[in-house]
Image (cartoon, helix red, strand yellow):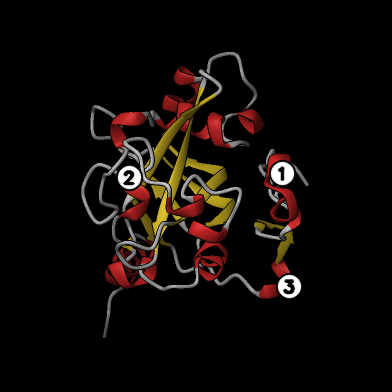
């Protein structure tokens, strides 16, 4: 018979199961974007403490044909080269001279698709988040792509990292997200993308207060 403590430890281990490569290498980036909802992004602090949040909002960017993607027209530069790596690679860029944006590369190598993580629900290491974003209410710590990067200590040095590594990763915490819990709508801040501006490629958990924009 399994003891209660052993059962608890096993449950905890399941809640901290790092996502495997095949989660990211699916060729449908929209499915990857939806599937990331409810997963936990972990970025350990300098002292090894876990700093993490549950993903509650994502946006998909679909490579060469997507006028909103940095890889539109198969553009490849020093800035966006990580988008062409194998799924499960991190793509971080700097925008407006102020904010970093954390993206998960999706698909096979050479297919420049990525999913922007737009918002998190803070879970662990909230003290670290408050230090990095002082004088902010907890709801404001991670309710936007620039905010969550600041709170988790993510900068351009994370660009190209492997999500199967030890510096940053995403965990399956066993939370079942039903289609009824997910909302979809146009992506934010891409009016320049013409007909692609209205594609319903942003996904979020309904009713979650940490979503950046309803």
- The picture places residue 70, in percent across and down from the top left corner, at 49, 44
54 horizontally vs 68: left or right: left
Residue at image point 42% right, 47% down: 75
Residue for badge 2: 81
Name the secondary structure under disc 3: helix
In primary-sequence order, the first of circles 1 and 2 is: 2
Q: Residues within 10 Å of mark 1 (few under 14, many from 20)?
A: some
Q: Residue furthest bottom?
A: 1
Name the secondary structure under disc 1: loop
Residue 153 seen in the current view: yes
131 horizontally vs 7: left or right: right
Q: Is residue 122 above or below residue 175?
A: above
Depth check, front residue: 66 or 1: 66
**Quarter of the N terminus within the rendering:** bottom left
Nearest to the eye among marks 1 and 2: give it. 2
In primary-sequence order, the first of circles 3 and 2 is: 2
Residue for badge 1: 209
64 horizontally vs 212: left or right: left
- The picture places residue 174, in percent across and down from the top left corner, at 46, 69
Residue at image point 55% right, 60% down: 65
Q: Is residue 82 above or below residue 175?
A: above
Q: CA distance from mark 1 to mark 2?
A: 34 Å
Mark 3 and mark 1 residues within 8 Å of each other at the beta carbon? no
Residue for badge 3: 180
Q: Is residue 28 above or below residue 213?
A: below
Mark 3 and mark 2 residues within 8 Å of each other at the beta carbon? no
């Amino acid at each position: 018979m399994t003891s209660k403590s052993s059962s608890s430890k096993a449950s905890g281990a399941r809640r901290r199961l790092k996502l495997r490569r095949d989660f990211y290498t699916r060729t449908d980036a929209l499915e990857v974007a939806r599937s990331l909802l409810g997963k936990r992004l972990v970025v350990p602090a300098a002292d090894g403490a876990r700093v993490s949040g549950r993903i509650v909002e994502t946006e998909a960017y679909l490579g060469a044909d997507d006028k909103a993607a940095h890889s539109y027209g198969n553009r490849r530069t020093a800035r966006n080269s990580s988008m062409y790596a194998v799924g499960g690679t991190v793509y971080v860029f700097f925008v407006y001279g102020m904010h970093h944006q954390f993206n998960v590369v999706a698909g096979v190598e050479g297919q420049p698709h990525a999913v922007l993580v737009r918002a998190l629900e803070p879970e662990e290491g909230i003290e670290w988040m408050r230090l990095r974003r002082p004088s902010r209410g907890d709801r404001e710590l991670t309710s936007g792509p620039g905010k969550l990067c600041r709170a988790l200590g993510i900068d351009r040095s994370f660009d190209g990292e492997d999500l199967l590594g030890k510096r940053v990763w995403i965990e399956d915490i066993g939370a079942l997200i039903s289609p009824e819990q997910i909302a979809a709508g146009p992506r934010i801040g891409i009016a320049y993308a013409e007909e692609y501006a209205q594609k319903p490629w942003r996904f979020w958990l309904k009713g979650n207060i940490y979503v950046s924009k309803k």
